[in-house]
Amino acid sequence: MEINLIPDLKRVAFIGNYLPRQCGIATFTTDLSEAFSEQFPEVQNMVVAMNDVPEGYPYPENVRYELRQNNLFDYERAANFLNQHVVDAISLQHEFGIFGGAWGKNILTLLRNVNAPVVTTFHTVLEKPNPDQYEVLREVARLSNRVVVMSEHSRNDLRDIYNVPEHKIDFIPHGIHDVPFVDPGFHKDKFGAEGRFVLMTFGLLSRNKGLEYVIEALPAVVEHYPDLTYLVLGTTHPHVVAAEGEAYRESLQERVRQLGLERNVLFY
C-alpha cells in the first residue's frame, strides 16, 4: 500500500499510557507510536507517558517525558516541554481514568497550553454522561483540532450528545496486528473448546466491561446452542487487583456455578 508523505512534519508527540504499563491504552499507544515510526521514519517520534505509580516504569528511550497523572503542575510542565521541543502535532489517547482530576479534567491544563495542533482519539464516548463527564469530554473535543472514534455509533454520539461539529470527527476502526491465519481448531484445542461454538472476551478484567451481563444472558443462549463456550481470556486489571484483589473474577465464577454453566464458561 502506498503511503502519502506528510509535508513539513518533523516532530510528533504521542500522549497516553505506554508499555510496559499494563493496560489496553498502553498497548494501543505503543502500537500506534511504533507503526507511525515504521511508516514515517523521517519524522521524529516522542512519547509523553502517563504514570499511575510514583516510581514510573522502565520505558524505552522514545518516552521523553513522564507525567504523574494526579499532579496538576506536571500537565503544565509537559505542555512547556512540548512547546520547547517545537512538536508539529500531538496525538492524544483519551480514556476516563488515565488522567488526574475529576473525570480526567487535568488533561485540559495541558491542552490549553500547547501550541501544536492536537488529534484526540476517544476510546470511550459515554451515551449517558453525568454533567462533569459531559463537560470534560466536550472541552477536550473543543480544544482538539480533530477527534478520532472507532465506531460509527461513537461518531453519532459525539455529534448528537456532545455537539461536536461533524467535520472534526474521523472514524478509524480499531486495528489489530497483522498475523497469519491459523486454523481456529488449533487454538480451540489449547483451551479445551474443540468442536464447540466459541464466544470470547479478551483483555484485562474490570467491572466496567460488563462480563456479568453476558453470563446472565447465557442460560437462554445455551438452551438453543448447548455446545457454546464463553471463553474469558485475561488477567484482572492491576488497578482492580490493588483495590479489591480478585473479588470481581471470583464473583463471576460464583455466578457461573449458580447458573450451572461450568461446561459453558471457561476462565484463563
Image (spheres, rainbow, N blue to C red):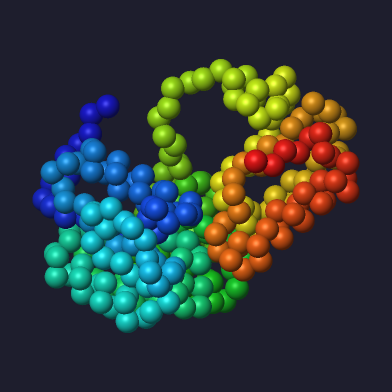
Q: Is residue 134 left or right of residue 40?
A: right
Q: Looking at the image, which residue is at 29% across and 62% down?
A: 48
Residue 173 is situated, as x and y percent measured from the top left of the image, at 45, 41
Instruction: Say if residue 208 shows up in the picture.
Output: no
Residue 26 is situated, as x and y percent measured from the top left of the image, at 42, 54
Q: Is residue 94 left or right of residue 257?
A: left
Residue 190 is situated, as x and y percent measured from the top left of the image, at 63, 26
Query: Which quadrant is the C terminus positioned in?
Result: top right
Q: Looking at the image, which residue is at 30% across and 48% down?
A: 33
Question: What is the total number of numbered labels drawn onto the structure image?
Answer: 0
Query: Which quadrant is the N terminus positioned in?
Result: top left
Q: Nearer the viewer, residue 145 or 246?
A: 246
Instruction: Say if residue 54 shows up in the picture.
Output: yes
On screen, residue 185 above or below 155 = above
On screen, residue 5 above or below 135 = above
On screen, residue 20 above or below 114 = above
Q: Nearer the viewer, residue 64 or 142?
A: 64
Q: Is residue 136 left or right of residue 81?
A: right
Q: Quadrant of residue 259?
A: top right
Q: Residue pushed farthest bottom? A: 73
On screen, residue 153 above or below 218 = below
Q: Is residue 262 left or right of residue 58?
A: right
Residue 109 is situated, as x and y percent measured from the top left of the image, at 34, 77
Q: Looking at the image, which residue is at 35% across and 49% down?
A: 30
